Image: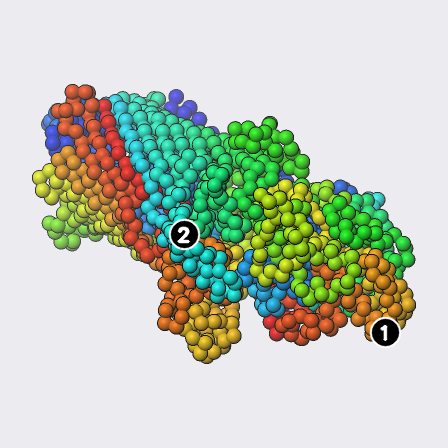
């Protein structure tokens, strides 16, 4: 390494001196508008400038035979030989799909044309039109091969980004880089409206991030002043009203009473309801729980640049209330950002950015047994909301977890306050032409305060949420991470045809967090207003807690790129990571990728076709890592729970082993092959990108792996070890076609359709023919329904296959369920034909991972009107319908109306009974297809005519109206067919996912 | 100037290249104790021992209620036919190798054993006064956990004196239950010889507890003379006596009384949740056994599991004071305690409602206030009572040496406390009388199922009981798989 650096110094050769002439000129676009910020460079040198606010430039040139290159993002570059001219005016032509467009590839950039990797980018204009509340919303349907699922539709609720399927049995989240900062996973903190572009590295080129790159990389660039020359003040905002997009069809009170009586009678019990005629519709609990709720966003941004400085400063406010719980499920965010680049000296540039974020969030329990929506589904429609005295009703006889969901909302109290500061200071020094050194320090700091209050409350007899004493739980956590990057970049063109560049660097990373937890009981007045430990009266046997972590990483990386005439392209990169997560001896890993491209359309033998502009074939292969697992999994620590009671009631505390250790723990390795094709037709009006990939992940990380009870894993505080096991393959195909043209005068159409297919298969689990199983169905019912098992997709659901309903005793007698079923029960398939239905008859009955993802966008601009829409679809994934609490008195889905009541009445829905039956064994009866097509967004905008707005000094005023989550076409009966809890295993076990909101929006953009 | 900047930039690069990376990465976890670097003081041993006691609370409740449900004393109950399906299946002898309650029993006992073995693994590391007492308590606990396992599952993999690490379970074959019993006897003999007669804190193992358990272990193997020896030692050392008032023996305020040979301690000081029942310091069995939807005086509501059957009720003699202490007749209770007109005493019938509840372990008002109250009742499980010791001694004498006179004296001592007249029988009649006395004296305490099994009476008394199968429960299928698929399943499962 040192030798290479010395070599770099030796390359510093003295500049020659020549006579100088000054060339001036003006650059305009194809409509004659002046273009500021255009790069003007003498070809083959670093001698250059940019045009000013009026599109003017002047440049000293020593050699009259030199060629000037004019380039600007979004326009076709032009080259002009100076000759005898002293004034060179240029009109640049708009480039629809610009091959010269800069693409970020991690610690550097390249151009669309020279790119050899599978990389997709979304620009600012494709972001803001969606009125996104989170950046994940932006990726959905717009980038092929990127799957977005909703962990929760609640305000501030998490979304999951998965790039090219599921690699890991542990953590599948991609690496997020924001303005060069390794950002962490809490993406709710990012204001999507402040984003200039998002780039996704999908293939092995992410190996430049080594052990961080296996899940793909999302590089987010926020707005800077670079692209505007004159100062620009913009103010935009929207206000919207949200409502639930979907509800589940349940029985009304009359139907419920009839069916409940029937079930009781079948179970040999007396009927519950006598005066059914008087019940009517009863309470529609979903209607009561869902409400309309506001969402709003306002942002102010000021940006511009001078010759030596570019700057962007902004502030934004976002606020959303929940469609369940309103202000009890709320998210407020303030972002303040400052982004400054400055040329300190001739060869020394500085870049800084700073983001401050303040978030306030309140949440309800979601997607678990006894959560608000779970209760709204299960509570009887015969229950009123309030009793005669105006108190909440108590949902008696409905099981201990099912309580009045409105009482639950009213008695939920918590808030989480996050303050976060993210920043970067970087210096770039150009040593000689083509050789620069960059050093940067970036950091993230966050404080998180949480406060939860459990009032003294009874929701009804024996309810699990009852509390006879009030309690407050508070925590204070802080997180700091920093990253120092040092990079040397060199690029040079030899003999005008050999472009060579290399990047060498190292990166030092540390992240550290500390937390304190305290609790107290007996809060004065039993109210949230007094809920703080300083006012609590009782601290008996409540121990304060604390935790901390410290993870470090140390990396080297390098990249070499070579191309011949931008026609034959080659890129190779390597990275070595050492991480403190693993045991000494297992800390170091080396990752690499090799890629090549061939611009076959530039070949002389390639026929010159009018309609065909550009064609490139790409191939890449590489190995990447994933180390996302808790640190120190190789040590056995005394962090378990050890509490017992002596002398009647005294708690005594000891020490016990917590997580089981695994000294062999290492990163998992992903090997990815990609071959891709980029084609442009009709002067770039049509662009096609297609990729085929095979991605194999070995030594999968499995956090908290199940282990034999003999290890003590089931002790209080015990956890399974993090292990490496198994091999998973994702292979797939991605296709994207875009069209962009002015089809008629004043009518511009842009459209994109993208499709991705991914097939996921577990190739092996470990040496033995074992499986790993997680997840459960029902209460005390079947465990281990979601599996990591050879031959099926990761997380595949495992249960019985059904084949209709037994219609008669004769059918049962001749079946494998003789003696254990009655007419009207579900018929299970005896897969191994051994005459009994047992565990051996369970098999793969559904996958949580979609096989096909589609996206479609359409934009129309006619004069001052603009219209856009985004549709997206996912198919091939399944859900486990686990939001039904299978107790005698709970409500049911209205499918139960079509139940079996006698021979021939139904072959799909079993009889109702309170007695024992095997109908609730986990089978495909409870697994539903999640296929859906969703109209994600429709927007219509109008830009006020220039002559109107000039009077008030504005340069642009646009107003628009928009609807998000317009409609979802699906057969799935649950709230959200795009939901997923984010886990690789058991991800679509639906216990009442918080649905996405349909939002009606009105908004504006003002620019001065 | 130019060179100066160049060097400034290169300083961090060069520093880093000089190889300080290893040091930078070599950062041990903070404020953490490595399990390999413990046992440096008496305090460390005490803390590890507390961890070994920790599992008693979980094991005590789950084995008691599960074996009670397996017996002919009670119905599973609950809310519906599918409420805690594992217990419903055990209640009707329809259980299979997929049963989460059996898995809890397996896992929690082995977790306790693992924590005991951790202490034994480092038993020689540090010496201090009282080390033998610590090891003796540890040995008692390990014997207790193994005895539960051998009762439920028969032959066992038997890790000793060393923690089982991930992946090592498959190296431990199932050993014949005789070998397990031998180990249990070794541990208990060591414990009895070294434990204090009086516990420093109630709930810790004592010499009496070790002797009584050793006697019971012998009785379970039909080793009557050995059993009688140990049990009579407990009796003759005179430390224990019957508690005078049987009707209040099981109330929370009468925990750790003169009759208590070994008691599992519970507390209401801390909340608990269904997510981790083994983490509760409360007696989970009590909430599960409570009267469903109850509203009225004295008692608090619960989940109506573990409900006594009529045949148990019918087995009590007229005038037996134990009846009221053991059985709550809910209908009679409501007649006696109707409550005010505007707030009458009410309850809800659960599944398999019999009209009776297990009065020894019922939720009572004011005993718990931490959420979830159903899981945090403080009443201790009277694991080994002196009455049990007397009856076991009587049985050992009667079935062994034939000293029926002494046996009869022990039985009549128990009967007298129950307000019943003395009996005078001998031989097999006395054996039957002892069995009957065990049933009514110990009803609701989890002894009945294994008494029936070890005396060969299970098939006669328990509906659905198949000889050659139901004497032991199946090893949970998932545990066989996680253990590397090397343990054969119990016969006929």
Residue pointed to by mark 1: B427
Q: Quadrant of residue A903?
A: bottom left
User: Within the image, what quadrant is residue B323 found in?
Assistant: bottom right
- The answer to whether residue A995 is seen in the rendering is yes
Horizontal placement of A568 versus A315: left or right?
left
Q: Residues within 10 Å of mark 2 (few under 14, many from 20)?
A: some
In front of the other: B220 or A840:
B220
From the viewer's perspective, tell me whether residue A717 is left or right of residue A66. right
When the figure is inspected, residue B444 is found, relative to residue A52, above or below; the finding is below
Question: In 3D space, how far apart are the residues under numbered discs 1 and 2 (Cα atoms)?
Answer: 67 Å
- Residue drawn where x is 47% and y is 31% of the image: A417
The C terminus of chain B sits in image quarter: bottom right
Q: Nearer the viewer, mark 1 or mark 2?
A: 2
SS of the residue under disc 2: loop
- In the image, residue A688 lies at what x, y percent? 22, 50
Q: Write down the chain letter for disc 2.
A: A
- Say which residue label 2 marks: A279
What is the chain letter for disc 1? Answer: B
Number of marks in the rendered image: 2
């Amino acid at each position: 390494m040192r030798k290479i650096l010395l070599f770099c110094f030796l390359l510093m050769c003295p500049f020659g001196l020549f006579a100088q002439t000054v060339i001036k000129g003006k650059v305009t676009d194809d409509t004659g508008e002046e273009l500021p910020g255009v790069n003007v460079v003498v070809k083959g040198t670093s001698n250059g400038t940019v045009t000013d606010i009026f599109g003017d430039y002047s440049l000293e040139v020593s050699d009259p035979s030199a060629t000037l290159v004019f380039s600007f993002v979004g326009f076709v570059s032009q080259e002009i030989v100076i000759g005898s001219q002293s004034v060179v005016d240029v009109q640049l032509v708009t480039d629809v799909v610009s091959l010269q467009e800069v693409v970020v590839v991690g610690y550097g950039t390249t151009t669309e044309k020279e790119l050899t990797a599978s990389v997709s980018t979304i620009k600012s204009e494709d972001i803001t039109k969606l009125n996104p509340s989170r950046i994940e919303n932006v990726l959905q349907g717009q980038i092929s091969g990127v799957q977005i699922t909703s962990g929760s539709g609640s305000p501030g609720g998490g979304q999951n980004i998965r790039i090219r399927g599921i690699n890991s049995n542990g953590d599948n989240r991609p690496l997020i880089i924001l303005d060069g900062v390794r950002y962490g996973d809490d993406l709710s903190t990012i204001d999507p409206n402040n984003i200039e572009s998002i780039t996704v590295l999908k293939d092995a080129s992410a190996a430049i991030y080594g052990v961080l790159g296996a899940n793909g990389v999302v590089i987010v660039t926020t707005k800077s002043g670079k692209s505007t020359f004159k100062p620009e003040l913009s103010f935009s905002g929207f206000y919207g009203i949200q409502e639930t997009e979907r509800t589940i069809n349940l029985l009304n009170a009359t139907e419920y009473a009839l069916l409940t009586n029937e079930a009781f009678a079948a179970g040999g019990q007396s009927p519950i309801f006598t005066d059914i005629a008087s019940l009517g519709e009863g309470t529609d609990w979903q209607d009561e729980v869902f409400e309309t709720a506001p969402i709003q966003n306002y942002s102010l941004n000021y940006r511009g640049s001078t010759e030596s400085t570019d700057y962007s400063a902004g502030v934004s406010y976002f606020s959303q209330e929940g469609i369940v719980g309103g202000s009890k499920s709320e998210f407020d965010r303030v972002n303040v950002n400052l982004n400054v680049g400055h040329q300190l000296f001739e060869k020394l540039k500085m870049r800084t950015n700073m983001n401050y974020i303040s978030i306030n969030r309140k949440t309800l329990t979601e997607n678990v047994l006894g959560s608000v929506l779970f209760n709204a589904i299960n509570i009887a429609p015969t229950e009123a909301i309030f009793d005669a005295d105006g108190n909440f009703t108590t949902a008696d006889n409905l099981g201990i977890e099912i309580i009045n969901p409105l009482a639950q909302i009213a008695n939920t109290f918590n808030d989480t306050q996050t303050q976060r500061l993210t920043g970067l200071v970087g210096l770039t020094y150009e040593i000689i032409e083509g050789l620069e050194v960059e050093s940067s320090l970036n950091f993230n700091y966050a404080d998180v305060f949480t406060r939860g209050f459990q009032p003294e409350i009874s929701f009804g007899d024996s309810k699990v949420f009852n509390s006879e004493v009030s309690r407050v739980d508070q925590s204070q956590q802080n997180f700091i991470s920093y990253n120092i990057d040092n990079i040397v970049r060199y690029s040079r063109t030899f003999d005008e045809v050999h472009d060579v560049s290399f990047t060498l660097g190292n990166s030092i990373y540390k992240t550290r967090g500390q937390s304190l937890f305290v609790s107290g009981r007996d809060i004065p007045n039993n109210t949230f207003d007094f809920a703080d430990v300083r006012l609590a009266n009782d601290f008996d046997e409540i121990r304060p807690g604390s935790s901390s972590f410290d993870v470090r990483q140390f990396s080297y990386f390098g990249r070499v790129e070579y191309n011949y005439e931008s026609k034959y392209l080659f890129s190779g990169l390597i990275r070595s990571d050492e991480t403190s997560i693993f045991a000494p001896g297992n800390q170091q890993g080396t990752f690499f990728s090799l890629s090549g491209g061939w611009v076959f359309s530039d070949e002389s033998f390639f026929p010159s076709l009018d309609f065909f502009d550009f064609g490139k074939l790409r191939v890449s292969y590489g190995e990447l890592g994933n180390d996302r697992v808790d640190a120190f999994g190789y040590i056995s620590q005394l962090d378990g729970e050890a509490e017992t009671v002596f002398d009647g009631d005294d708690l005594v505390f000891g020490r016990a082993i917590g997580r089981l250790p695994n000294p062999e723990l290492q990163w998992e390795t992903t090997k990815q092959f990609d071959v891709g094709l980029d084609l442009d037709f009709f002067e770039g009006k049509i662009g096609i990108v297609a990729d085929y990939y095979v991605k194999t992940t070995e030594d999968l990380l499995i956090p908290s792996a199940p282990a034999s009870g003999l290890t003590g894993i089931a002790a209080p505080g015990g956890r399974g070890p993090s292990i490496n096991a198994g091999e998973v393959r994702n292979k797939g195909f991605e296709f994207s076609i875009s069209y962009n043209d002015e089809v008629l005068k004043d009518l511009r159409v842009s459209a994109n359709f993208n499709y991705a297919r991914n097939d996921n298969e577990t190739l092996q689990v470990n040496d033995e023919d074992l499986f790993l199983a997680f997840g459960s169905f029902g209460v005390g019912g079947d465990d281990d329904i979601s599996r990591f098992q050879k031959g099926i997709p990761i997380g595949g659901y495992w249960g019985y296959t059904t084949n209709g309903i037994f219609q008669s005793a004769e059918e049962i007698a001749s079946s494998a369920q003789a003696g254990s079923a009655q007419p009207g029960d579900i018929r299970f398939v005896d897969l191994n034909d051994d005459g009994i239905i047992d565990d051996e008859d369970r098999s793969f009955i559904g996958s949580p991972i979609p096989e096909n993802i589609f996206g479609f966008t359409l934009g129309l601009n006619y004069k001052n009107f603009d219209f856009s829409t985004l549709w997206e679809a996912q198919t091939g994934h399944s859900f486990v319908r686990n939001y039904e609490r299978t107790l005698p008195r709970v409500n049911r889905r209205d499918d139960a109306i079509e139940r079996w009541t006698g021979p021939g009445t139904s072959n799909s829905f079993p009889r109702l009974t309170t007695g024992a039956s095997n109908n609730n064994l986990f089978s495909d009866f409870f697994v539903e297809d999640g296929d859906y097509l969703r109209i994600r967004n429709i927007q219509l905008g109008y830009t006020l005519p220039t002559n109107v707005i000039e009077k008030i000094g504005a340069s642009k005023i646009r107003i628009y109206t928009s609807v998000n989550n317009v409609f979802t076409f699906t057969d799935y009966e649950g709230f959200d067919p795009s939901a997923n809890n984010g886990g690789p295993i058991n991800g679509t076990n639906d216990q009442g996912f918080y649905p996405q909101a349909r939002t009606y929006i009105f908004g504006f953009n003002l620019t001065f | 100037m130019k060179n100066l900047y160049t060097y400034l930039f290169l300083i961090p690069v060069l520093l880093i290249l000089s190889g300080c990376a290893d040091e930078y990465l070599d950062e041990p976890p903070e404020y953490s104790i490595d399990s390999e670097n413990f046992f440096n003081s008496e305090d460390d041993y005490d803390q590890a021992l507390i961890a070994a006691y920790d599992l008693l609370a979980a094991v005590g409740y789950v084995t008691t209620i599960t074996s009670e449900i397996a017996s002919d004393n009670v119905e599973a109950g609950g809310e519906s036919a599918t409420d805690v399906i594992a217990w419903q299946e055990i209640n009707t002898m329809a259980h299979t190798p997929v049963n989460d309650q059996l898995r809890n029993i397996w896992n929690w006992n082995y977790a306790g054993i693992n924590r005991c073995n951790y202490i034994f693994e480092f038993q020689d590391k540090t010496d201090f006064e009282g080390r033998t007492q610590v090891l003796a308590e540890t040995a008692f606990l390990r014997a207790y956990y193994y005895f539960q396992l051998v009762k439920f599952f028969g032959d066992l993999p038997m890790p000793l004196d060393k923690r089982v690490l991930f992946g090592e379970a498959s190296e431990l074959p199932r050993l014949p239950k005789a070998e397990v019993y031998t180990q249990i006897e070794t541990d208990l003999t060591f414990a009895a010889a070294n434990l204090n007669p009086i516990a420093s804190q109630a709930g810790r193992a004592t010499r009496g507890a070790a002797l009584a358990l050793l006697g019971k272990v012998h009785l379970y193997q039909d080793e009557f003379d050995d059993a009688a020896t140990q049990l009579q030692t407990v009796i003759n050392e005179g430390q224990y006596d019957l508690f005078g008032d049987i009707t209040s023996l099981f109330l929370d305020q009468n925990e750790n009384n003169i009759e208590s040979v070994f008691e599992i301690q519970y507390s209401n000081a801390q909340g608990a949740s269904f997510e981790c029942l083994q983490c509760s310091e409360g007696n989970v069995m009590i909430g599960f056994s409570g009267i469903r939807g109850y509203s009225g005086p004295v008692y608090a509501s619960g989940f109506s599991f573990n409900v006594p059957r009529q045949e148990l009720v019918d087995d009590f003699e007229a005038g037996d004071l134990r009846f009221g202490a053991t059985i709550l007749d809910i209908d009679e209770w409501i007649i006696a305690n109707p409550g005010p007109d505007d707030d009458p005493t009410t309850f809800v019938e659960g599944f398999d409602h019999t009209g009776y509840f297990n009065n020894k372990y019922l939720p009572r008002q004011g005993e718990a206030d931490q959420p979830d109250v159903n899981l945090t009742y403080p009443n201790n499980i009277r694991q080994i009572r002196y009455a049990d010791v007397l009856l076991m001694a009587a049985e050992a004498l009667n079935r062994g040496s034939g000293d029926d006179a002494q046996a009869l004296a022990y039985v009549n001592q128990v009967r007298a406390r129950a307000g019943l007249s003395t009996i005078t029988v001998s031989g097999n009649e006395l054996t039957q009388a002892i069995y009957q006395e065990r049933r009514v004296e110990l009803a609701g305490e989890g002894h009945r199922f294994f008494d029936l099994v070890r005396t060969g009476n299970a098939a006669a008394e328990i509906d659905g009981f198949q000889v050659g199968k139901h004497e032991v429960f199946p090893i949970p299928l998932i545990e066989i798989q996680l253990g590397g698929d090397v343990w054969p399943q119990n016969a006929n499962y």
